[in-house]
Image (cartoon, rainbow, N blue to C red):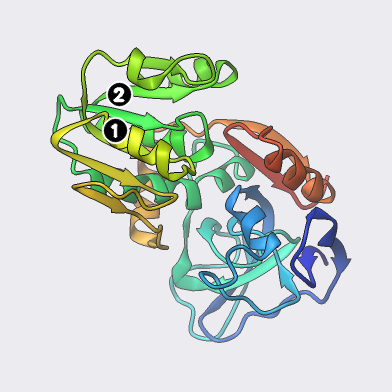
Amino acid sequence: MKAARIHQYGDATVIRIEEISRPVPASGEVLIEVAATSFNPTEVALRSGALRDLVPVSLPLTLGWDVAGTIVGLGEGVRTHAVGDQVIGWIDGAAAEFAVTGAGTVVTAPATIPLADAAALPLAGLTAWQAVERARLVPGERLLVNGAGGGIGGFVVQLAKRGGAQVVATASPRSRQAVLRNGADQIIDYPTTSVGDALDGQVDVVLNLVGLDEPRSAALASLVRPGGRIVSVTNEIEAPNASHVVARNDSAQLADLVALVDSGTITVEVTERHLLSALATLHRKSEAGGIRGKVIVLPVP
């Protein structure tokens, strides 16, 4: 099978599309024929070695965390899934034609969207779910989503609106319409407008999805009312009532997200679709700030 792998840390040139042996499911595992994975900007940091202390891996490594596909093989003892089931999950090694993972890490895929598009949901959706959960939103509260135009931001805005928040979102002009479709009440065009100047008073909660240096973190924290909360999924922010969310894999929460998709409560918007052979190009595009929303990567044409 074909797989996108790295044998060493480095720039995007270390990504190779290789022919390797198809994996065999061990006890408790399932074999998935991959319909798609999705690109996550965090994978750039993984590839470069910036995450080597936080996310230790063995090289060579097959890239890809999100998977959507069809189960084509079962390891011994698997009773929760059957061959032919369409599933999604947050796994290791999804940037390939086939992948294996523990049966408990995948859930039934949404029935209302294309299977490949469902690869956009696991990592970004779970990060958004856990960040909004940490924010402890109260209906009617004013929430500032910093970085609403990214893949996580789209889900954050939708989940926050579902929770009854009034959502103010920072986004670039290219993301404006998508963020409005997701339900934002106000858009701040951050490339041309100071967030502080655009806000009419302080907010109850800031949810940060953007990597910030110390001065910008302090400026963002100043926008929160006394007693308000700050949640960041990137860097830690030194401020009262600030917390840092490191997303965790949770199949029960992922199943809840699938239910919200199938009920029409949450939409999954895919901005681009590319073949696995273009993965290195996507990494370069991300490093140049050229990625918006969720990008799907297909293992075969």
Gap between marks 1 and 2 measured at Cα: 7 Å
**Which amino acid type corresponds to the residue marked 1 in the rendered image?**
Ala
**Considering the numbered disc 1 on the image, is that residue within a helix, a strand or a loop?**
helix
Residue name at image x 51 percent, y 69 percent: 54
**Toward which corner of the image does residue 71 lie, by quadrant?**
bottom right
Q: Is residue 160 above or below residue 284?
A: above
**Toward which corner of the image does residue 204 lie, by quadrant?**
top left
Q: Is residue 170 above or below residue 83?
A: above
Front position in the image: 153 or 208:
208
Q: Which mark is residue 44?
A: none
Residue name at image x 51 percent, y 58 percent: 89
Front position in the image: 131 or 213:
213
Residue 265 appears anywhere in the view: no
Q: Position of residue 215 (x, y in %)?
A: 41, 39
Front position in the image: 257 or 125:
125
Q: Position of residue 161 (x, y in %)?
A: 28, 27
Name the side, left or right, on which 159 lies relative to 31: left
Question: Badge 1: few (under 14), some or many (20 or more) residues near its Cα, within 10 Å?
Answer: many
**Considering the numbered disc 2 on the image, is that residue within a helix, a strand or a loop?**
strand
Q: Are marks 1 and 2 in contact (CB under 8 Å)?
A: yes
Name the side, left or right, on which 21 lies relative to 63: right
Residue 53 appears anywhere in the view: yes
- Residue at the extreme left of the image, as rendered: 227
**Toward which corner of the image does residue 16 lie, by quadrant?**
bottom right
Question: Badge 2: few (under 14), some or many (20 or more) residues near its Cα, within 10 Å?
Answer: many
Mark nearest the camera among 1 and 2 is 2
Q: Which residue is mark 2?
A: 167
**Which amino acid type corresponds to the residue marked 2 in the rendered image?**
Val
Q: Which residue is mark 1?
A: 160
Q: Position of residue 101 (x, y in %)?
A: 57, 72
Mark found first going from the N terminus, 1 or 2: 1
Query: Image quadrant for the C terminus?
Result: top right
